Amino acid sequence: MTDEQWGMLQGNLLKAVGKNNYSSWIEPLDFDDVRDGVATFNVPTTFLGNYVKQNFGDQILYQMMGMGLNVSRVHFTVPVGQSPAVSNPAEGAAAAEGAFVEAAPQKREAPFAAAPLDSKFTFANFVVGKPNELAHAAAKRVAEGGPVTFNPLFLYGGVGLGKTHLMHAIAWELQTSRPDLNVVYLSAEQFMYRFVQALRDRKMMDFKELFRSVDVLMVDDVQFIAGKDSTQEEFFHTFNALVDQRKQIIISADRAPGEIKDLEERIKSRLQCGLVVDLHPTDYELRLGILQSKVEVQQAQYPELSLDAGVLEFLAHRISTNVRVLEGALTRLFAFASLVGRPITLELVQDCLADVLRNSERKISVEEIQRKVSEHYNIRLSDMIGPKRVRTYARPRQVAMYLCKQLTSRSLPEIGRCFGGRDHTTIMYGVRKIEDMRAQDGQLAEDIEILRRILEA
């Protein structure tokens, strides 16, 4: 292929994949040669080569064939003297077998394929708050790439709380600060697939060599291997070998090690011997901070849209399931407002996100709030709802009113009826009273946050 043809191919790929993808993944490619129907490209790292193979290999081949070139396969290779900054299992397998990364649209390397790191999941894009500050600090310490201080680092929490984000951020940080380290990131499912593939192809020695030669092993969603005896056996031996070599291991799961059903006791024990960190459900302040950071991105894409005051606060209060739902709701809101040509108001939010808002309050009722508040303050439910105005009952009653207003879609008159038939103005007064006191009374603010977490759990 001539320089002119290479330039034409680059132009075609720019149109096909878009400017951002082109600058990130196609521009670093350096055309080398076409021989025997195989086009070879030099890449700076095997990580980049593997990503291009998985995501753009077919497109490159299609464009080359469209130019009349006799090409049936595409190869990516790292020139001698260069080493990958961040690798994944597919790259490691290629290195262990003395091969280079290749993409053949006729025949995929199934069933194993490692997902690339997400460029949005960096420390710079991670919003830190009380529920995740310990996990963030621990991840930053591991990302420094220095001597192992706690091994393994075990991150656990519910869906959308930032486990995968932190793991990707560690990998990106190590890519920059410690390019000499061999970092392998994969899901537990991918570990299992790679193990099964090695058994099928009778390449267990290659498998063992691959996973025992890494400097940092990162396994996401380890609960997936629970109940899979052979995979657990190999994972246990890999874990022990790396710990003995003082190599860093980072694990994530949706539950604490001791709570993962059908996970072998010896593995639970091993996972608990390091630092186990819980990513708590997001609180209101953290959700608001996340929304504020994401709004900057949305407003850059939709500069013509205006956002009414109170919208972000409303979303932070009402959508508490997980961060992914929150971010998805914001993206949907901006796109909807742009399509209908309307400013983003609370009315528009309720129209556009009606289904999301319904789901977010799926198990929080006025009755449940009343019950939890009375339990928290150790008073009888009948006294809190009743007519007595002594402070012992009045303050918990106002806290319950405030939480009902924030966590449910019930109107003030409806809430009033649930509090012994009180007028809606009484509910309004109670809500405003708590709003004013929260800023001055630290104990009250803490009580409300504890109750919110209990109700949203």
Image (cartoon, rainbow, N blue to C red):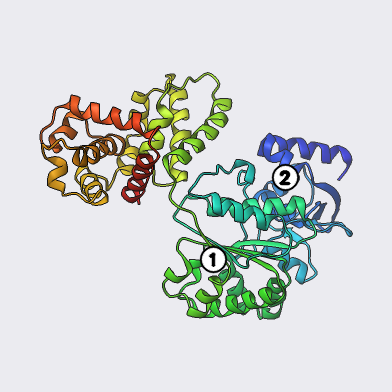
Q: In which quarter of the image is residue 411?
A: top left
383 vs 261, left or right, is left
Residue type indicated by callout 1: Glu
Badge number at residue 189: 1
Residue type indicated by callout 2: Trp
Total numbered labels: 2
Task: Note whether residue 54 is visible.
Answer: no
Q: Which residue is drawn at 27% across and 34% down?
A: 405
Q: In this view, does 242 lie above or below 313?
A: below
Q: Is mark 2 on a helix, strand or loop?
A: helix
The image shows residue 456 at horizontal and vertical percentages of: 34, 48
Badge number at residue 25: 2
The foreground one among 23 and 313 is 313
The image shows residue 160 at horizontal and vertical percentages of: 47, 50
Q: What element carries label 1?
A: helix
Q: Residue at x 17, y 42 (%)?
A: 384
Between marks 2 and 1 in the image, the one whose residue lies nearer the viewer: 1
Q: Residue at x 31, y 35 (%)?
A: 406
The foreground one among 155 and 160 is 155
Task: Note whether residue 66 is visible.
Answer: yes
Q: Is residue 289 above or below residue 94?
A: above
Label 2 to label 1, Cα distance in Å?
26 Å
Q: In which quarter of the image is residue 207?
A: bottom right
